[in-house]
């Protein structure tokens, strides 16, 4: 087994945690005995993988899986929201005829994107609460992911996760990094002209975070409400993303069990919370994560 220290992933950042779960899943697809633990004593807690993959093998697997998911899973529409019947039909095609328990499949993505049992007034499926770009203000989650996936190469992955060189490209992101919130009041440089400072994106980190969505399934929550794993309502009627960093190396689906509650009896876990912020008016509303705080 090899030890891969992904020091370019910050576990105290919502984007970083999603990316860590994506990294864990990609490695587990290649090697089912992959385990992950968090190095929580570091200045910025980061995930450590115990896997048969080398760093180069991991980088190659990330790019291959990212582009495969872009063409085979995320290609049915620019956004998640489609008529429930269409969504059900597309999702069923990705359910394997045979499979082993706790084995990742593409059906995991469709369970995470939406539920055909929860629809809006137009009978479209309601997207996961992680969908911060589902048509509002020209934001297109699946289309944007596909564009990022095809920009991701092995060299960028190695630099982003192992070498501490966060190469940023001029391209859209998926809005999961708290600093992606560039509202007028938060801009110190030329706030009236947002085009003067184009988005600079850590492509591998965003790509990996999208792949991590497969670990966060959705489910009906009563009164035609869609619930999303790890998203909990708070006292201010907003929604919080709550996650934990565990110290013992564990398998993927054991770790996924930790995501289903904001209180868990496991020891050696550090918990964090990030609130989903709604910015803009009814026609220009966008969603962002607040900076995380420890629980």
Image (cartoon, rainbow, N blue to C red):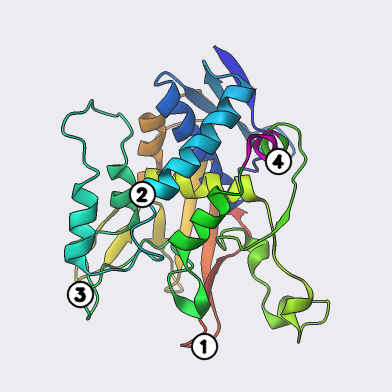
Q: Nearer the viewer, residue 106 or 102?
A: 106
Q: In which quarter of the image is the N terminus?
A: top right
Q: Distance between the residues labelled 1 and 2?
A: 32 Å
Magenta segment includes 154? yes
Instruction: Kindly identify which numbered label has been placed on residue 44.
Output: 4
Of labels 2 and 4, the one closer to you: 2
Please tell me which of labels 3 and 2 falls first in the chain. 2
Q: Residue furthest right?
A: 189
Of labels 1 and 2, the one closer to you: 2
What's the residue at 50%, 56% (across, down)?
Answer: 145
In the image, residue 188 above or below residue 26:
below
Instruction: Kindly identify which numbered label has been placed on residue 281.
Output: 1
**Residue 23 place in picture, x, y as percent:** 52, 35
**Residue 183 place in picture, x, y as percent:** 67, 78
- The reply to whether callout 1 and callout 2 are in contact (CB within 8 Å) is no
Q: How far apart are marks 4 and 3 (CA)?
A: 43 Å
- The reply to whether callout 4 and callout 3 are in contact (CB within 8 Å) is no
Image position of 6 (left or right of 245):
right
Element carrying mark 2: loop
Q: In which quarter of the image is residue 254?
A: top left
Instruction: Kindly identify which numbered label has been placed on residue 73.
Output: 2
Element carrying mark 3: loop
In the image, residue 46 above or below residue 292:
above
């Amino acid at each position: 087994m090899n030890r891969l220290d992904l020091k370019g992933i910050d576990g105290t950042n919502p984007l970083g945690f999603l990316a860590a779960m994506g990294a864990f899943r990609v490695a587990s697809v290649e090697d089912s005995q992959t385990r992950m633990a968090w190095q929580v004593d570091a200045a910025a807690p980061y995930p450590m993988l115990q896997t048969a993959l080398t760093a180069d093998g991991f980088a190659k697997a990330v790019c291959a899986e990212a582009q495969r998911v872009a063409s085979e899973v995320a290609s049915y529409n620019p956004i998640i929201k489609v008529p429930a019947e269409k969504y059900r039909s597309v999702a069923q095609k990705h359910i394997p005829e045979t499979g082993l328990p706790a084995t990742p499949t593409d059906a995991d993505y469709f369970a995470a994107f939406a539920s055909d049992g929860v629809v809006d007034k137009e009978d479209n499926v309601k997207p996961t609460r992680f969908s911060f770009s589902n048509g509002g203000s020209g934001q297109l989650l699946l289309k944007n992911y596909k564009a990022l996936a095809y920009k991701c190469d092995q060299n960028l992955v190695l630099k982003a996760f192992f070498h501490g060189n966060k190469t940023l490209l001029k391209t859209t992101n998926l809005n999961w990094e708290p600093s992606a919130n560039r509202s007028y009041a938060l801009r110190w440089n030329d706030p009236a002209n947002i085009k003067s400072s184009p988005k600079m994106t850590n492509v591998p980190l965003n790509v990996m975070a999208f792949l991590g969505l497969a670990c966060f399934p959705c489910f009906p929550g009563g009164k035609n409400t869609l619930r999303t794993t790890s998203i909990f309502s708070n006292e201010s009627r907003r929604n919080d993303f709550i996650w934990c960093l565990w110290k013992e190396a564990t398998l993927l689906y054991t770790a996924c069990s930790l995501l289903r509650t904001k209180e868990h009896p496991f020891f050696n876990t550090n918990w964090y919370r990030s609130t989903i912020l709604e910015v803009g008016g009814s026609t220009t509303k966008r969603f962002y994560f607040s900076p995380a705080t420890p629980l």
